[in-house]
Image: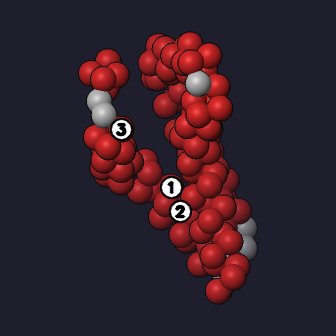
Amino acid sequence: MASLDNVSALRALLLGALLSGANPKNLVLTASAATSIVEAGAHHVDLTVAITVFVLVGSCTVLGAVIIHLVGGQRAASFLDSVRQFMITNSTVITAMVLLLLGANILGDGLTGLGR
């Protein structure tokens, strides 16, 4: 993580695209979202809206950091650095909580499907 502090913007973009595309968690989330959209029977405009909302929700943390950096400039740097430090320090807990919530959601969906 520390080695990423000094990469160029283009390298960060390429690395982010590679890591997010190859991340099994992201693949499972995307497959789950695609399945939900298909099961809902979305077509044309509804399909476009559903995909757009999924991408925006999935990207909100990255977009938020970029917007804070662009709007806050140098003042935002210390805030973003403290958030980065928090996430590095607590990455195991954050990952465990996200996986716990996803597991509970998938389990709930499965149990609901059994009741049909």
Q: Callout 2, which amino acid?
A: Ser
Q: Tell me whether circle 2 and circle 1 mark residues in contact (CB < 8 Å).
A: yes
Q: Which residue is mark 3?
A: 9
Question: Residue at horizontal 60%, vertical 68%?
Answer: 51
Question: Residue at horizontal 53%, vertical 62%?
Answer: 32
Q: Callout 3, which amino acid?
A: Ala
| Image: 50 above or below 39 | above
- Residue 23 image point, x, y percent: 36, 47
Few, some or many residues within 10 Å of mark 1 (<14, 14–19, 20+): few
Q: Which residue is mark 2?
A: 32
**Quadrant in which residue 55 is drawn:** bottom right
In the image, 66: left or right of 57? left
First along the sequence among labels 2 and 3: 3
Q: Tell me whether circle 3 and circle 1 mark residues in contact (CB < 8 Å).
A: no
In the image, 115: left or right of 85? right
- Residue 16 image point, x, y percent: 36, 43
Q: Callout 1, which amino acid?
A: Leu
Quarter of the image containing the N terminus?
Answer: top left
Q: Rounded to the nearest whole Å, what is the CA distance between mark 2 and mark 1? A: 5 Å
Give the tally of numbered discs: 3
Asked whether 49 or 116 is in front, the reply is 49
Quarter of the image containing the C terminus?
Answer: bottom right
Few, some or many residues within 10 Å of mark 2 (<14, 14–19, 20+): few
Circle 3 SS class: helix
Q: Which residue is mark 1?
A: 29
